[in-house]
Amino acid sequence: MTNRQARSAEFGAVLRGAREKAGLTQEQLAGLSTVSIRAIRDLERGRVVRPRKDTVRLLADAMRLGDTGRAALELAADSASVGKALHDVYSPELACPPMPVHTLFGRESELRALSDLLTGERERLVTVVGLPGAGKSRLAQEAALQVHRRGDIPVLWLPMDAGGRTPDKAAHRPQTALANWVRPLVSEGGHYDELASFIADRPTLLVLDGHEMTPATSPALMYLLHSCRRLRILLTSRRPHHVSGGRLLPLAPLPTTLAPGPPPIPGPAAMSPLPGDSLSARRPAVELMLSYVSHLRPDLLLTDSVIGVVAEICEALDGIPQALEAATSWLLLYSLEQLREMARESPLALVDGAPPLTLGAAAPLGELLASVRAGLPDRQAALLAAMAPSASSWTVDDAAKVLGVPSARAAQDVHALLLHGLIRQFPAAPGGADRPGEFSVLHLVRDLVTGGRPSQEDAAPRLLATGAA
């Protein structure tokens, strides 16, 4: 049998197996797919050297194949086994993370820490954990690019929360077929022996963006790490997962106050600072929102007073990048001063009611925050509910008194809420190292917990009324 005949027979076997698994006869598949029964018979008998992509798509749709089955069919149609597909995308030139679209603001220390973990000798499983919209994917993207460029290491980037398959334009790329094959294996906790046998001892970074670890999926990842000694895995997750041998890197929202560090070095007279530079320097959340403002409203002069208002909006929205971008989209309709009042009164209404600026926008932030809150254990949920109404800062001892529990127990739950990113810790004042740490529930979370958030249906009308006032 020639190579071409062997490849045709391979596709025929995959198609026949998928059809039988779907419980369909050749006649039934022909009726559902609009592909002739003669063509289906020829395909299953290996008489067709290279099936047309449209034919493969029609057959896959008719059999209602999931990502794994569809990818296997596509790989067989392309005359490629999984190992061949991996070989096609394994070179550093092709296997690389997606290129960033926006500048990364204010994450220098986190990026340095993450890059060090991924390039060191000791850590092989790292999870970036934080609130939805805090910028976990963007940070992972930048770190993966650094790893890729420094060591010429292939990066397999898998978006785990994409909610489906990739766009049609990329549907037949080898990287896409591979991603569609690996993604369900990870999410379903399968053993990916073929992936492990191909990677073997080659240096590789596997990024699972938006992966929520479960007891079913953890053993599969550990198996892959044990099988591939030079593999590193980077996860981004909304919830902290303690995996043996793994390292957590919590990602808090962007600082809204002055970040530590030396003051900016003044330039020569010809390079005098612009208005407001002194107010935005070393304030990452303010710098990020100003970048949104300058693109959406280039006519708006960034004076000290304007930047002061932006800083107040950033504070009300906790410095969460997704919230800042959503709020800025209202600038076509409202003034910055109106946005500030809306953010103070009901930050979630402002954010969730905003019109999306990009295609494929994320789910409303309030909905994502609610899902994180719903996943909290009872003790942590009780602490969040008890401390949310307080607009002032509080300590672990304060939380223990409110809940009527020992301070040691309250400290455990405060620590867990910090890992989730639901509360913010205030830096100690100079000379105040002996003072107890102070915390505050994020404004957006407080709005959610205390019931200040309107429904999706009336979010926009309420914003209109607030703006008019």
Image (tube, rainbow, N blue to C red):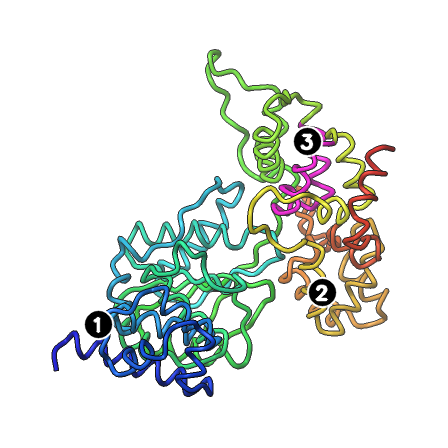
Residue 397 spot, x, y in % from top left = 79, 62
Q: Which residue is mark 1?
A: 49
- Magenta highlight: main SS: helix
Closer to the camera, 432 or 147? 147
Residue 230 spot, x, y in % from top left = 30, 68
Q: How far apart are the two marked residues, 2 and 1, measured between alpha carbons? A: 53 Å
In the picture, measured across the screen, residue 270 lies left or right of residue 81, that is right
Closer to the camera, 311 or 68? 68
Instruction: Check disc 3 and give the amino acid type.
Output: Leu
At 41% from the left and 78% from the top, the residue drawn is: 30
**Which of the labelled discs sits on residue 332, or is there none?**
3
In this view, 136 is above or below 405: above
Helix, strand or loop at mark 1:
loop
Sequence-first tag of 2 and 1: 1
Residue 326 spot, x, y in % from top left = 66, 43
In this view, 86 is above or below 104: below
Around disc 2, counting alpha carbons within 10 Å, would you say few (fewer than 14), some (14 to 19), or many (20 or more)?
some
| Magenta-colored span | 307-333
Residue 315 spot, x, y in % from top left = 71, 41
Q: Which residue is mark 2?
A: 373
The residue lying furthest to the left in this view is 2
In the picture, measured across the screen, residue 341 lies left or right of residue 437, that is right
In the picture, measured across the screen, residue 120 lies left or right of residue 302, that is left
Sequence-first tag of 3 and 2: 3
At 78% from the left and 51% from the top, the residue drawn is: 393
